[in-house]
Image (tube, grey):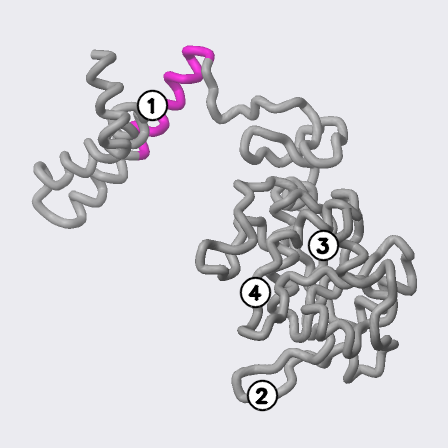
Amino acid sequence: MAPLRSGVEQRIPLLHKLISCPHCLCFWLSLAGSALLSHTALEAGCALLLGWRGGYYFNRLFDRLAGDDSTEPKGPRQCGACNAPYEQNFLERQGHYFCSQSCWFDYLKNQRLSKRPVFDTDELFTRQEVYPVSVKTINPTQAKELLDSDKAYTYIDVRSMPEYEVAHPAGSLNIPIMHKESMGMIPNSDFVYVVEKHFARDAKLLLGCQMGGRSQRAAEALVAAGFKDVSNVMGGFGGARDQSGNVVEKGWAELGLPVEQGISEGTDYPSLSQE
């Protein structure tokens, strides 16, 4: 029997799940029974519901009597995010306890999935598998307020070196997500590496580009690499526009925020990328 089960698991994963999960098995048996034995749609629906849910609760009862309550969280008796002591009204999610919905979302944000290359073989951006709110979205005005109120924040301009040299937010660093060449834009495969070289995983990073598209992809790449506090500056330096060309988010320059021109050692990409 073991070789048969192993063969089914390797060749037909769905069938293996059917024969290994009692709840799934109850559903399919109820579906088959209701289709064969019922005369009306109402009878079939009632039979399916009773057989499926009845089998589900019967299996739960059997598991509890056997001492294997799979619904009971197996994590430590404390909040899985802030480590607060366990209380009766804690939430139970994915085998852990959480003292609030906020802590549950914080836990999800910190769950990194498989890290993917920033660019695929066709040199196109790879969509990273990150929890959506892991990347905060702010506008240039909010970015300036954060930079003024907390010196721990750093603005990284992910535009190309020529774009950065023409003009950029005052005090920003230049680590391009793409390089501008004569034939067009080419990927910077060292982007994450250079950021990792200069910043810890808990650094407060604000990422901006010309409008907000490149910086969003750059932010996702950093979150996938383990950075915990990353914000995308929507509107970037030049402002975000819709398909008709209408401004939907004013950029750093249009808002009259402090701008610098040229490059200086220590903030330009050649300096930052040196070993």
Q: Is residue 19 above or below residue 129?
A: above
Q: Looking at the picture, which amino acid does disc 3 mark?
A: Val
The mark that comes first in sequence, 3 or 1, is 1
Query: What's the mark number on residue 245?
Result: 2
Front position among marks 3 and 4: 4
- The residues tagged by marks 3 and 1 sit, at their Cα atoms, a distance apart of 47 Å
Residue at left 91%, top 61%? 149
The mark that comes first in sequence, 3 or 4, is 4
The reply to whether discs 4 and 2 touch (Cβ–Cβ < 8 Å) is no
Q: Which residues are magenta?
A: 53-67
Can residue 13 be seen by looking at this rendering? yes
Front position among marks 4 and 2: 4
- The residues tagged by marks 2 and 3 sit, at their Cα atoms, a distance apart of 28 Å
> As rendered, which of 232 and 78 lies closer to the eye?
232
Front position among marks 4 and 1: 4
- The residues tagged by marks 4 and 2 sit, at their Cα atoms, a distance apart of 25 Å
> As rendered, which of 112 and 83 lies closer to the eye?
112
Q: Looking at the picture, which amino acid does disc 2 mark?
A: Gly
Residue at left 17%, top 43%? 44
Circle 1 sits on which residue? 58
The reply to whether discs 4 and 1 touch (Cβ–Cβ < 8 Å) is no
- Name the quadrant of the N terminus: top left
Q: Secondary structure at mark 2?
A: loop
Drawn side of residue 64 relative to residue 170, left or right: left
The mark that comes first in sequence, 4 or 2, is 4
Q: Looking at the picture, which amino acid does disc 1 mark?
A: Phe
Circle 3 sits on which residue? 230
